[in-house]
Amino acid sequence: MEQKEQKALLSDFLYIDRERIASFYAQIFGGDLLSIEKEVSDIQKRGSGVSGGIPQIVDAKAESINQIEEAKKEIINPHDVKVRDVIAKFLELAETGRTPIRIYEGSLIFMDNHLLKIMLETISIAGKFPMLVDSNLSKKEKQEFKKILEIMNKLLKVMPFLPAFLLRTKETNVVGTIKEEFLSEPISSFYLKHGGKWLKDVLVIGIEENTTEEELPETHLYGALKELLPAMSSMVFPPDSIKIVPIAIFRRVGIIDI
């Protein structure tokens, strides 16, 4: 029987949230996948016979067949099999439009705590920031923004910010925070290799964040946070960005025969 040709889509995963992937896989398929077992059988035939009869007239041959079957079991580490299967299911769900699961494609850049520190220190030394120089902010608003920069500088010294990504699509900006341990390589290596340029043709699949329009309570502490947090968010993420919890960030490499 002729075996059907199969094709596989190769992906270069820049980021995989393996904890969430394992959780979703268990929910979809009824358990986690630890290993794959594959049995391969090899059948060999060995024959022995005796010849007899009248020479030049007939040659009769009796043959006995000894059949030997060798079985081999392979245990395969599933590795990205779970990732592939979960993403396939997520793509099916995303097509329905009745779920917060989203997939976007565009140009991507990463940002981490070290970059924010360098940026803020540079601002404090140079005393310049686009929002303070090339904007229509009033003098009072600029003074308030300077205070926010000072507070952020102090916060960064005692509280690390989670690494983040920004994906620029044709229609919008998509942002989110990531866990550095699930990156394929340190963010600093992306800076060095690409010099701050965008990575092209990157796909992000994840769950859209849903928030309410309700504001924080009008107490002394929450009132201060209400002013500080939006400003901090707008410095890292462009306003009106779509915020998602990323499950995987990857690039398509190509399709191969398997």
Image (cartoon, rainbow, N blue to C red):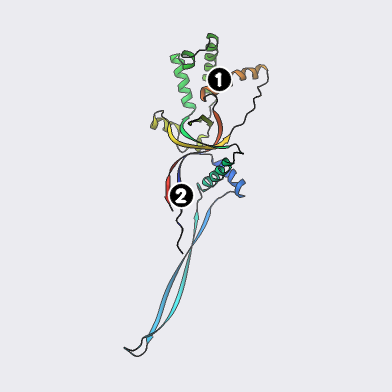
Q: Amino acid at mark 2?
A: Ala
Dot 1: what SS? helix
Question: Where does label 2 land, which residue?
Answer: 8
Percent position of residue 184, x then y? 46, 38
Q: Residues within 10 Å of mark 1 (few under 14, many from 20)?
A: some
Q: Tell whether label 2 touches label 1 (CB within 8 Å).
A: no
Number of other residues with Cα within 10 Å of mark 2, as a class: few under 14, some 14 to 19, many 20 or more? few
Q: CA distance from mark 1 to mark 2?
A: 45 Å
Q: Position of residue 69 (x, y in %)?
A: 47, 69
Residue 182 lies, with reference to residue 43, above or below; the image says above
Which residue, given by chain and number where applicable, does mark 1 sit on?
231
Of 29 and 238, the residue lying toward us: 238
Q: Residue at x 62, y 19 (%)?
A: 226
Farthest residue to the bottom: give it.
54
Question: Does label 1 or label 2 sit earlier along the sequence?
Answer: 2
Image location (x, y in percent) of residue 39: 50, 61
Viewer-proximal residue among 196 and 75: 196
Residue 68 position (above or below residue 16): below
Q: Amino acid at mark 1?
A: Ala
Question: Where residue 57 sits: x, y (%)?
Answer: 33, 89
At mark 2, the secondary structure is: strand
Say which residue appears at 43% left-offset and 47% top-offset: 255
Between disc 1 and disc 2, the foreground one is: 2
Q: Is residue 61 above or below residue 82?
A: below
User: Which residue occupies the extreme top position in the image?
Assistant: 139
Tell me the number on the disc at residue 258.
none
Residue at the (46%, 71%) spot, across then down: 68
